Amino acid sequence: MKATALTVGSIGTNCYILYQEDTKAAVVIDPSDEAALVEARIAALGLTPRAILLTHGHFDHGGDLGRLLARWPVPVYCHPADRDLPTWLTHGVVFDRELADGQTLGLAGMEFSVLHTPGHTPGSVCFLCREGELMFTGDTLFQGSCGRTDLPGGNWKQMAASLRRLAELRENWAVYPGHGDSTTLDAEREENPYMEMALREEV
Ligand SMILES: [Zn+2]
């Protein structure tokens, strides 16, 4: 498995493209609201997308995925709890296949486990790819921070529970967030003040 990343769109969203070098089959995570560059990267690498995964339903993560669907009509996976968000937060996002906590997805020869981690939105998820111990955390966990909880559907108590859940994973996963630099779960367990706050709130 190989991975390539782009930071694109109106709010600088990280889009990740995971692919197999031999079959060229690919999975696109969060193609953003400016998918022209994503489309160009996919085409330049000669890849064939098999699925689009959304860490949550916000427009800056999936608002322009229709551009990819027009060329590669693939399933789009998102947690259904984000369907009810106001449309100014989700415009352009296509809700197609429903994700559920604990689900395992086999896509393009890769296996993804779904962790439902609400807080930033009701339907936020993290995708864990055991091959390579990669974790895609969307706007749940950032390097040294976490996603905002003050937008409609946001909830700090849920975010705290989600951060605790991530902190309690045993492995030291490589963390690829929806915005900003990549990090590791060990680094965040040691240095992330929001994760620390979440762990302290546990009673
Ligand atoms: Zn968001």
Image (cartoon, rainbow, N blue to C red):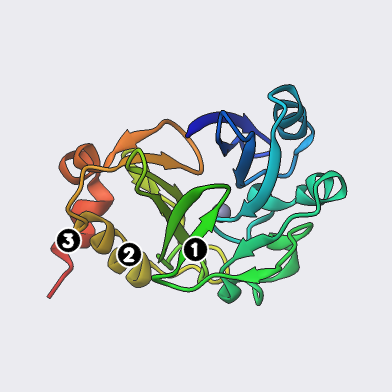
Q: CA gap, disc 2 to disc 1?
A: 10 Å
Whether 3 is drawn above or below 83: the answer is: above
Dot 1 or dot 3: first in sequence order is: 1
Q: Foreground residue, 109 or 117?
A: 109
Q: Disc 1, ligand 1: is the CB inside 8 Å?
A: yes
Residue farthest along the front direction in this orientation: 22
* Image side of residue 117 versus residue 37, left or right: left
Q: What's the residue at 39%, 33% (across, down)?
A: 182
- For the residues labelled 3 and 2, say whether their Cβ atoms are less than 8 Å apart: no
Q: Disc 3 marks which amino acid?
A: Leu
Q: Which residue is mark 1?
A: 124
* Amino acid at dot 1: Ser
Q: Which residue is mark 2?
A: 162
Label 1 residue SS: loop
Residue 139: tell me if it is visible.
no
- Residue in the picture at 15% in, 41% down: 190
Residue indicated by mark 3: 199
Sequence-first disc among 2 and 1: 1
The image shows residue 162 at horizontal and vertical percentages of 33, 64
**C-beta proximity under 8 Å, tags 2 and 1:** yes
Q: Mark 3 or 2, which is nearer the eye?
A: 2
Disc 1 and disc 3: Cα gap in Å?
20 Å
Q: Nearer the viewer, residue 193 or 112?
A: 112
Q: CA distance from mark 3 to mark 2?
A: 10 Å
